[in-house]
Amino acid sequence: MTWWLLFYGLLFSLGFFLAYLSYGQLYKTKELLRSGIRTKATVHSFKTHNSDGTTMYTPTFTFKDKNLEEHFYESKVSSHPRPYDLGEKVNIIYGRKNPKNVKILSFWGLYAAPVILFMVASPLLILGGAYLAYRLY
């Protein structure tokens, strides 16, 4: 019985840690939306790689900051088919103090990390918490 308590306690702890990371990512996104600078980026090129026999495309963008310095940004998401066309304009936001802190202004561009982290954390919290509540109360 103590092994099960330890196991489900570990599941609950891992779920709590992932939920905390999810909240941290959500907070960083909120701060970027509050204080960041919105602009348009241009799809510059695509990096390609194979995944399970499918060619995946990772867009690379260029944009100019408020000082008119040009920056490159490589998306953290690859997809098939290409998500954009070459030369297409995309709305982005970048950090006022750090122009390398860039996010695409779309739901998944802004919230992919917190949503995925919380999707993994939720069942761990429920399973671990339910078992611990059942055994300890």
Image (tube, rainbow, N blue to C red):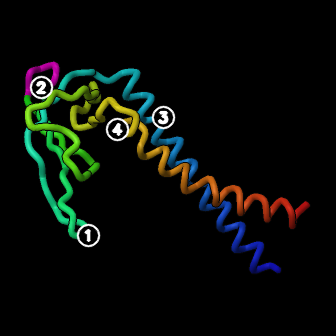
User: Which image quadrant for residue 135?
Assistant: bottom right
Looking at the picture, which amino acid does disc 3 mark? Tyr
Gap in angstroms between the C-alphas marked 4 and 2: 19 Å
* x then y, percent, for residue 83: 23, 42
Looking at the picture, which amino acid does disc 2 mark? Lys
In magenta stretch: residue 106: no
Q: Earlier in the sequence, mark 2 or mark 3?
A: 3
Q: Earlier in the sequence, mark 3 or mark 1?
A: 3
Which residue is pictured at 19% across the width and 24% down the height?
A: 40
Q: Is residue 60 left or right of residue 126?
A: left
**Front-lying residue, 52 or 46:** 52
Question: Which residue is labeled 3 in the image?
Answer: 27
Residue 109: mark in rendering:
4
Classed neighbour count for the residue bearing mark 2: other residues with Cα under 10 Å, few (<14), some (14–19), many (≥20): some
Above or below, 85 relative to 135: above
> Of discs 3 and 1, which sits in the foreground?
1
Looking at the picture, which amino acid does disc 1 mark? Asp
Q: Earlier in the sequence, mark 3 or mark 4?
A: 3
Q: Secondary structure at mark 2?
A: strand
Classify the position of the N terminus by image quarter. bottom right
Q: Secondary structure at mark 3?
A: helix
Gap in angstroms between the C-alphas marked 3 and 1: 35 Å
**Residue stretch in magenta:** 64-69
